[in-house]
Image (tube, grey):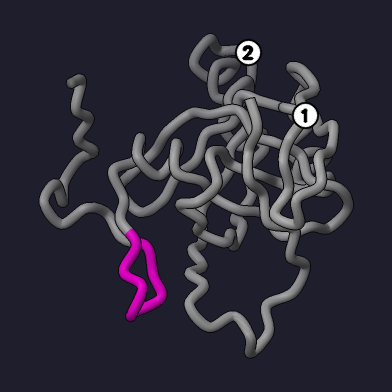
Amino acid sequence: MSNVLRLQTNKTQSDMGRVYAEIELIRTGDLSAVADGYLPPALVRRMKVTVLVDSGADMLAINAHIKTQLNLPVIQTRECSLADGSVALLEIVGPVDIRFENRETTVRAIVLPGEAEPLLGAIPMEDMDVIIIPYEKKMIPNPKNPNYSYTSLK
């Protein structure tokens, strides 16, 4: 399966039309350990991250620094199509919980090299039932379902 990823490192004035959001990433294994009584809640590995919201990409993409900070295990490696047309063999890690406002989901993440800009793709966005408001340059919970995520099984 190929994924379109955009490897950007810095926000600039040419970011016109780009939407960014602050999300929290949490090591899912730590949440399980807390639920099972093996880890105190204060030791759960988590971090707030500003991501490029990209509905043209499929998955969550994080950089190597985030992978290390959360100590996310490698699940597999996969060939991925990059925004410049090249193909790279990248690690898939996880699981990782994503939290945004009153929404959350659990996903795997593609690891981009170095300090590449993280991005949030369509699959986790759909699962959290969030939408992009381009003219305001923001992502928000779907106003049709303000209190909880909605999923269609059709």
Mark 1 closeness class: few <14, some 14–19, many ≥20 residues within 10 Å: few
Q: Which residues are magenta?
A: 132-139
Work out whether 135 lies above or below 149. Answer: below
Q: Specify the amino acid type for callout 2.
A: Tyr
Q: Nearer the viewer, residue 60 or 94?
A: 60
Left/right placement of residue 78 relative to residue 150 reads right
Residue 105 location, x and y as percent? 42, 33
Residue 52 location, x and y as percent? 57, 61
Q: Specify the amino acid type for callout 1.
A: Glu
Q: Secondary structure at mark 2?
A: loop
Q: Residue at x 58, y 43 (%)?
A: 25
Give the label on residue 1, or none: none
Work out whether 4 lies above or below 2. Answer: below
Give the distance between the C-alpha atoms of the residues marked 1 and 2, in whole angstroms. 36 Å
Q: Residue at x 77, y 17 (%)?
A: 76
Magenta residue check for 65: no
Left/right placement of residue 99 relative to residue 93 reads left
- Mark 2 = which residue? 38
Q: Secondary structure at mark 1?
A: strand
Q: Residue at x 53, y 29 (%)?
A: 107
Left/right placement of residue 150 relative to residue 132 reads left
Q: Residue at x 75, y 50 (%)?
A: 85
Mark 2 closeness class: few <14, some 14–19, many ≥20 residues within 10 Å: few
Q: Are the residues tagged 1 and 2 within 8 Å (C-beta)?
A: no
Q: Nearer the viewer, residue 88 or 148?
A: 88
Left/right placement of residue 92 relative to residue 125 reads right
Residue 152 location, x and y as percent? 19, 27
The N terminus lies in quadrant = top right
Decide which of tag 1 and tag 2 comes sooner along the chain.
Answer: 2
- Mark 1 = which residue? 79
Q: Quadrant of residue 38?
A: top right
- Identify the residue at the far left of this view: 144
